[in-house]
Image (tube, coloured by chain):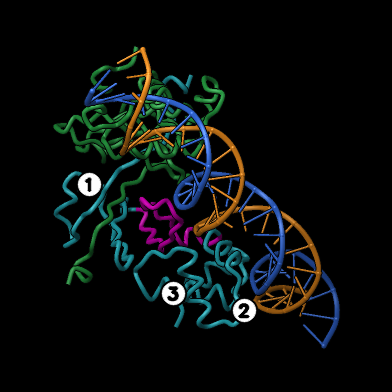
Chain colours: A green, B cyan, C blue, D orange
Amino acid sequence: MIDNQLIAKLKAKHIKITPKREAILQLFLNRECCFSPDQVWGHLRKQFKHCGLPSVYRNLELFAQHGVLTKIQKTDRRLYYALCKDHDDHPHYHMICVDCGRVEDVPTNIVPEVDKVKGFKILKHFYQAEGVCQQCAN
Amino acid sequence: MIDNQLIAKLKAKHIKITPKREAILQLFLNRECCFSPDQVWGHLRKQFKHCGLPSVYRNLELFAQHGVLTKIQKTDRRLYYALCKDHDDHPHYHMICVDCGRVEDVPTNIVPEVDKVKGFKILKHFYQAEGVCQQCAN
DNA sequence: AAATAAATAGAAATGATTTCTATTTAAGGG
DNA sequence: CCCTTAAATAGAAATCATTTCTATTTATTT
């Protein structure tokens, strides 16, 4: 059922494959959506009697740090994660459905014309760069 | 000292010009930076003996809703506001200095090549669209 | 100057996220 | 397959940004 390549990748990094970690991965593999820690927790509690929210936070962050998940920025300023499609050859940004959480990639080269993409009705969009300005670099 | 055109605009909307609101506007007018509510509060407390943080939050949000300030998305997922340069003819995104908070505009049409802009050393950047996907629109 | 609707301070509540600690568990070696 | 051990977990508690609440004060209009 679960992606064996993914499991192998994690084992190679000495990350233990616990039932809950499998369940989290399965959730993301089943749906092309981003989830908040709380949403993931909601799913896990259907399958596991005991299930701590802090573990969910910890595992999502762990997966993100190992390139399995990616953090999604939304205007509600909450934490969201989505499966990371790490095609290094395809730099891309994200387009999120505010209803179902579906995440689609936006190739960087069409950002200015993003309104025309993939049948999404865009409600908000923003580009944000963080860096060091010329004055502060000195 | 303070921008009279801005004051007039607010009065026209029946927004009271209190000393603290003036001080908040003055802060944003003096520096081309984004500020968190907490940072604004820090400035105000130098000038006013009594000064509530909730008032700062309320006023920043008020200014944002009237197009005077704009919300800035940063990866720390905290609230930030910056002066809104509402040139409707110039659609733009934002580039933020993580050190001093300086905000510069990025014309939308150069986003893919944004690395080359204005002497900023870019640390992170992302584009994010929120909307409704085709499936959910039905 | 008085009336009034809006703005304020300060305390308290909220809620997402993180930290802490004792207990449990996955993985690898025998 | 059982043991060992380092890592993962649950659950409680702490943290901290943000919001709500309420009585008091204030900017504006008359």
Residue B63, how many percent across, how many down? 52, 62
A98 left or right of A49?
Answer: left
Q: Amino acid at mark 3?
A: Leu
- Check disc 2 and report its element: helix, strand or loop: loop
Q: In this image, B104 relative to A32: left or right? A: left
Which of the chains bears the disc numbered 1?
B
Q: Residue at x 38, y 43 (%)?
A: A73
Residue A31's disc is: none
Instruction: Compute the Cα span from label 2 to label 1.
Output: 44 Å
Residue at 52% in and 76% down: B22
The residue beneath circle 3 is: B27
Measured as percent of width and height from the top left, residue B37 is found at 49, 64
Q: Find the magenta span and give its range.
A: B62-88
Disc 2 packing (10 Å; few <14; some 14–19; many ≥20)? few
A55 relative to A32 in the view: left or right: right
The label on residue B50 is 2
- For this rendering, which residue is in front, A14 or B53? A14
Residue type at numbered disc 1? Val
Q: Residue at x 60, y 67 (%)?
A: B55
| Element on which disc 1 rests | helix
Percent from the top left, x then y, of residue B127?
A: 30, 43
Q: Which residue is mark 1?
A: B111
* Eye-nearest disc, 2 or 3: 2
Residue type, numbered disc 2: His
Question: For this rendering, which residue is in front, C27 or B86?
Answer: C27
Mark 2–mark 3 distance (CA, rounded to whole Å): 18 Å
Front residue (pair A83, B79): A83
